[in-house]
Amino acid sequence: MSEFIITTYDWVPEVPRGYVRDLRLRWAAEEGQLPYRVESTSFQDRGPDHFAKHPFGQAPMLTHKDQTIFESGAALLYLGEQSDKLMPTDQARRYNVTQWVFAALNSMEMASVPWSLFKFSGTDNDQSGYPMFDNFLTSRLTNLEKALAEREWLTDQFSVADIAMVDVLRLIDRFDGLAGYPTCRALKERGEARPAFIKAHADQLAHFKRGDG
C-alpha cells in the first residue's frame, strides 16, 4: 500500500499541544496499521502553497497518491476506507459509522468549540454570553450520555467515529466539562487507553517539541 502523508504545523504554542487535529489522523493511521509519515507546514508563515491545498490555511491535511484532503473529518473517512479496523465493509454499518463522524464534528464539536474558547480566555462569566453556550453544550452532552448507555463504542466496533468523538470529548474534559457525564467520560478514557492513541499523542507532543529549537 502506498504511503499516506499527514501534514501538520512545524510548531504550535504549549497550550494546544496534544489537541491539534492531526492527532486524529495519526491515531487512525496507527489503528489501521497504515503506512504514513508526517510532514510540516509553517505555523508562522502559511503561504500561497498552503492555501492552495487548504482554503482556510489550517492543518491537518492528508495526502495519498495524487490526492490531498483537508478537514480532519474528511480525512478520517478516507482513512476508514483503507482498513476494516477503522470502518466496516458492509454498507449499512459504514453509514452508521459515517453518521456518528458527522455527529461528533457537527452536533458535538459545534457546541464544544465556542464553550472551550470561553474557558481558554477566562471569560466564562454571566456577562460574556457564556451561559448560553454552556446550556447548549449541556444539552448535547445530556443526549450523548443517553445514546451511549450500555455501549462500548459508538457503533458495534471501534471506528473512525470513536476517534472523532473521543477527541472532541477530550477538549471538553480538559476544562472538567464531563464531570457530570460518566458515560461520556468513560468513552473518552477507553479511547485514550488504546495503544494507538498513546503513540499518536506522544508523537505529536514530540513533533512540536522539536520545533521549539
Image (cartoon, rainbow, N blue to C red):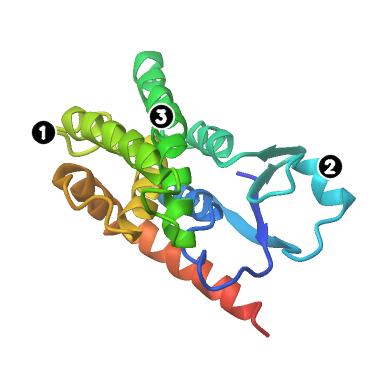
In the displayed structure, 181 sits above or below 102; it is below
Give the structural element (helix, strand or loop) at label 1: loop
Query: Is 149 placed left or right of 54 in the picture?
Result: left
Q: Residue furthest bottom?
A: 213
Query: Is 68 placed left or right of 87 in the picture?
Result: right
Q: Residue furthest right?
A: 48
Q: Earlier in the sequence, mark 1 or mark 3?
A: 3
Residue 47's image quarter?
bottom right
Q: Residue at 46% across / 35% down in the picture?
A: 110
Residue holding disc 1: 150
Q: Quadrant of the C terminus?
A: bottom right
Please name which of the two marks, 1 or 3, marks the residue nearer to the observer: 3
Mark 2 crowd level (few <14, some 14–19, many ≥20, 10 Å Cα)? few
Q: Amino acid at mark 2?
A: Ala
Q: Earlier in the sequence, mark 3 or mark 2?
A: 2
Q: Residue at 39% across / 35% down in the picture?
A: 108
Give the structural element (helix, strand or loop) at label 3: helix
